[in-house]
Amino acid sequence: MHDNPLTRRQLVTGASAAALGAALSPATLGAPHNRGEILRPGKLKQSVARWCFGRVKLPDLCKAGKEMGLAAIDLLHEREWSVAHDHGLEVSTGFVGAGTIPHGLNDPKHHKTILDAFEKNIPKAAKNRVRNVICFFGNRVTGMSDAKAAQNSIDCLNKCKAIAEEHKVTILVELLNSKVDHKGYVGDNSKYCVEVIRGANSDYVKVLYDIYHAQIMEGDVIRTIRNNHKWFGHYHTGGNPGRNEIDETQELYYPAIAKAVLATGFDGYFAHEFIPRQKVPLDSLRKAVRLCDVG
């Protein structure tokens, strides 16, 4: 479907670090100084998921992102945080080893791993100005009802939230689709995700609402945002079908979605998580930033 060498699953597990260094020539990457344009930052704080642009060296992505008006880089490991900061960008979400996509909050056998990771790494995140850290709802367990999975998740988050609240770092739990990309994932709809986050009852535990995944599972994106924004702490974009550019080649109209997010008073990050198909990947990102600069 795409030629990106670094998958989301590899990034979550910390694998294929060498792929982060893979890069094309500046002309192919579409470096902003070659395009003759610097975009202003908008009211909506935009970010970009590092894994989607694995063909671009991280320093080059940061430099280009800063020049096109991004506020942050998303989904970075600790070893990468300083690279974003050195280029005047924030880290909008950090990986800290708190489980994986299939091994998440719903299964008690993973709770110690998740809690230990947060207790060890949330203080580091706070010290390094990383506002959010990520974990996952996990894959369904045979014989476990969704209600039990939700309660297990609440129990785990209730153990984790104290360290998050102490350091003012938000734990994000991501909604992912189980139809196309993540078969068996339990947190595949907004009702379930909100139920868990509501149960945790903390300003520092929120849903990462991935618009691409939500569109696949339930659609009705803008109404869902309006009705549930209190529980949403972060957003991801992506074109559907295909998880590619968010332009006119796919079915979601992102200017309206971005306006809906901004209208809720959201002050977090709106992160682009699409896999560019264009030969010049940074041109795709630049177009997405323009499209969502609705402030």
Image (cartoon, grey):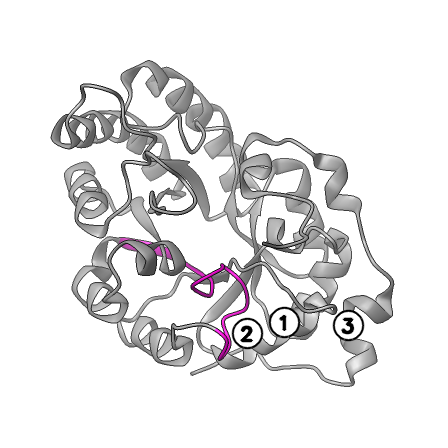
- Position of 4 with respect to 179 (left or right) is right
Mark seen at residue 288: 2
Residue 259, picture quadrant: bottom left
Q: Which residue is drawn at 21% across and 63% down?
A: 224
CB atoms at circles 1 and 2 under 8 Å apart?
yes
Residue 22 location (% of width, % of height):
79, 48
In magenta, the rendered stretch is 232-249
Q: What residue type is labelled 1?
A: Ser
Label 1, label 2: how far apart the Cα atoms are: 6 Å
Mark seen at residue 284: 1
- Position of 24 with respect to 131 (left or right) is right
Residue labelled with disc 3:
30
Q: Which of marks 2 and 3 is nearer the N terminus?
A: 3
Nearest the camera: 194 or 24?
A: 24
Residue 195 location (% of width, % of height):
15, 43
- Position of 243 with respect to 205 (left or right) is right
Q: What residue type is labelled 2?
A: Ala
Label 2, label 3: how far apart the Cα atoms are: 14 Å
Which residue sits furthest front?
1
Q: Which residue is drawn at 51% across and 67% down?
A: 46
Q: What residue type is labelled 3?
A: Gly
Q: How crowded is mark 3: few (under 14 residues within 10 Å), some or many (20 or more)?
A: some
